[in-house]
């Protein structure tokens, strides 16, 4: 039974986040604070990558449940790490500033791009994570908010970056609603679910990269309550989609 809780690839995915935080922050307390902000996002991203891989293999229903079990493991490992990180973290604004500057942050971000690219390639192939509609919706919305802030706002682009999780939630929820139109269409239900998940993937991926690269992350960090709410929504939407999908397959 315990064998189903161990997956080396998921361990590497989640554990590597600590290494990239160490490269980016270069100071124990700042590493802890950065990792405390990132770790749940990394776990969620790993889970969503696994779900996209699962959606690529719907032709064999017997593989769906095992694939779902493995997909959830990165998030489970992230939850194990979150407890100690939370206890060791501080709320001092100075501990959210990387004294080493952006250069090491860029190195950490490049490392994360590499590990995430590896994970995506192994699970489903990198092309499965490239979708024009999802990209236009997500990045177009972010650009619209940036322009709105430039014309009518206070030109504080950190506030725009704080909206990244919310943009992912809004459009993923819309995708979930639209997916209900295809519950009786075996050819369209899978792609519809994949687009739903990809918006969340883009949001998490971009937020993680920004947290690694930006030298002072105090303005884009989330409180513990914000992290809990965001995490729950990012969990519920795709898992609700998977529930719809599994029940559809059972009926057919």
Image (cartoon, grey):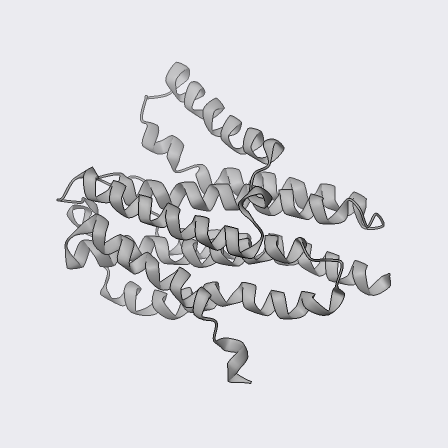
Residue at horizontal 63%, vertical 70%? 66
Q: Is residue 251 visible?
A: yes
Residue 227 figure quarter? bottom left
Residue 210 figure quarter? top left
Give the quarter of the figure containing the C terminus. bottom right
Residue at horizontal 45%, vertical 46%? 204
Q: Residue 122: horizontal and vertical position, in percent?
A: 52, 56
Give the quarter of the figure containing the N terminus. bottom right
Residue nearest the observer in this picture, 171 or 184: 184
Q: Where 82 sits versus 137, above or below?
A: below
Q: Residue 103: horizontal and vertical position, in percent?
A: 20, 39
* Left or right: 133 as drawn, with respect to 3: right
Q: Is residue 90 visible?
A: no
Q: Where 86 sits versus 110, above or below?
A: below
Residue at horizontal 41%, vertical 67%? 11
Q: Where 219 sits versus 236, above or below?
A: above
Residue nearest the observer in this picture, 70 or 224: 70
Q: Tell how many labels.
A: 0
Q: Residue 73: horizontal and vertical position, in percent?
A: 50, 68
Outermost residue toward the bottom in this view: 1
* Left or right: 200 as drawn, with respect to 222: right
Residue nearest the observer in this picture, 98 or 166: 98
Residue nearest the observer in this picture, 116 or 210: 116
* Left or right: 182 as drawn, with respect to 88: right
* Left or right: 228 as drawn, with respect to 246: left
């Amino acid at each position: 039974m315990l064998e189903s809780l161990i997956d080396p690839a998921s361990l590497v995915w989640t554990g590597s986040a600590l290494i990239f935080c160490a490269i980016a922050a270069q100071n124990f307390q700042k590493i802890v604070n950065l990792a405390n902000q990132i770790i749940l996002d990394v776990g969620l991203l790993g889970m969503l990558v696994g779900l996209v891989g699962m959606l690529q293999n719907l032709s064999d229903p017997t593989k769906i449940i095992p694939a779902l079990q493995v997909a959830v493991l990165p998030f489970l490992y992230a939850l194990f790490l979150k407890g100690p990180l939370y206890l060791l973290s501080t709320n001092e604004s100075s501990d959210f500033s990387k004294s080493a500057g952006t250069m090491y942050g860029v190195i950490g971000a490049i490392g994360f791009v590499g590990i995430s690219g590896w994970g995506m390639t192994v699970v489903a192939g990198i092309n499965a994570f490239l979708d024009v509609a999802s990209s236009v919706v997500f990045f177009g919305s972010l650009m619209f908010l940036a322009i709105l802030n430039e014309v009518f706002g206070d030109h504080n682009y950190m506030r725009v970056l704080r909206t990244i999780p919310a943009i992912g939630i809004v459009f993923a929820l819309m995708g979930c609603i639209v997916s209900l139109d295809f519950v009786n269409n075996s050819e369209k239900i899978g792609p519809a679910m994949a687009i739903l998940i990809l918006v969340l993937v883009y949001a998490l991926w971009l937020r993680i990269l920004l947290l690694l690269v930006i030298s002072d992350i105090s303005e884009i960090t989330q409180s513990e309550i914000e992290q809990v709410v965001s995490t729950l929504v990012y969990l519920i939407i795709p898992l609700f989609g998977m529930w719809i999908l599994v029940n559809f397959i059972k009926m057919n």
